[in-house]
Amino acid sequence: MMDELQQLEEANLVLLAQEGDAGAFRQLVELYDRRLLYFIRRLLNETEEAFDVLQEVWLRVHRSLHKLRSPRAFRVWIYRIAHAQVMSALRRKRVLVTYEELPLDQVPDVTLTETSFEAADAVHAALETLSLDHRRVLTLRFLEDMSVEDIAFVLECKAGTVKSRLHYAKAALGRRIEEENNG
Amino acid sequence: MGELPVPDDFRSQLLKQDQSVHSSRYQEHRMTVESQLLQAESREKLAKRIVVGALLTAAAVFPLLASRAFGGADPFDKDATVFSIGLGAVYCIAWAVAFIGIASYYSRFLPRVRRAREELRDETIRDMRREIGELRQLIEAFPKSRDTNSSSSE
């Protein structure tokens, strides 16, 4: 219920920012800056570059906020911009990001259990060791609780691709956490 | 997907793990973002001021040119002086700047598009107010129903 209220408040802030309210834009920065930094840091693995990319993201958001039609889509829209900026930065560094597509019927349904959320430090540490493709889907899932469709929009790929990536990423994460616990 | 939603506090716990989010470098970054936003805003304000200034300049120069007090603005005119030709050039430049400024503003916010967007926004605000009202009613009703349940169980 509070989630819904927060979403409405956020949509209201987006509308005000679109009308040129600088204070509302600052509040959006306050709301998203740390989360975006976490996301960008996980993808880039470099703090300084992450700050540069994040600053560019905010400038782009400021320039093109008036183009956003649905204020409720702000969250996925801003992550899409951030993801695109990270990909550009990685391309400049010549890091190749590839998808592996699997047919939907071949993707087993993996569910998150309550124990997945018991140790944020273990998830955080394990995330560092996963591949870029796994890191980005898991960060969006854990940090923003995004649906498969929203993640697909952010990553600009098909929902089926996200579903399969998410499955393998969760399996890899589980293995890493287990290794950490055993080791 | 039939999955558990990620608990609210998991995000904050995850964020706490990243040292860069809480470092002094982060504060520095926030100041940089703030100054960049201020710069972007001041650039927009400056562009508006330039357009207004250009229009005012054109309005101020026009009577001087029309009265031919300093001679004709046309360089081939017999009455033309350096000053009057200069005024004519200022007048043309002022109009050009104003025209470009207004055209770029309208290319961004075409009136029809803007109206449609405003209508959409008004509609969203109405929807949001209605939803907020419904949520408030739910929140207000929640403790009452809990009290009723607890008293009935006693």
Image (tube, rainbow, N blue to C red):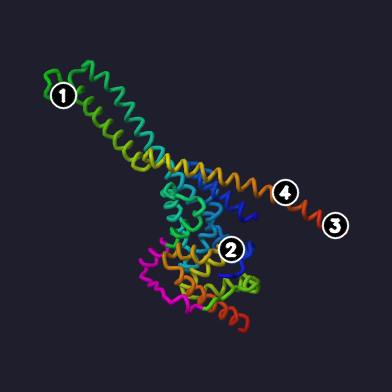
Q: Quadrant of the N terminus of chain A?
A: bottom right
Residue type for callout 4: Glu
Q: Classify mark 2: residues with Cα within 10 Å, few (<14), some (14-19) or many (20+).
A: many
Displayed quadrant of residue A160: bottom left
Identify the element where label 3 is drawn. helix
Q: Residue A98, position in %: x, y?
A: 39, 73
Mark 3, mark 1: which one is toward the viewer? 3
Q: Secondary structure at mark 2?
A: helix
The part of the chain drawn in magenta is A84-107
Q: Is residue A140 above or below residue B68?
A: below
Q: Nearer the viewer, mark 2 or mark 4?
A: 4
Q: Earlier in the sequence, mark 3 or mark 1?
A: 1
Whether labels 1 and 4 belong to a single chain: the reply is: yes
Residue B15's disc number: 2
**Mark 4 = which residue?**
B140
Q: Is residue B66 left or right of residue B112?
A: left
Residue flagged by tag 1: what amino acid is it?
A: Asp
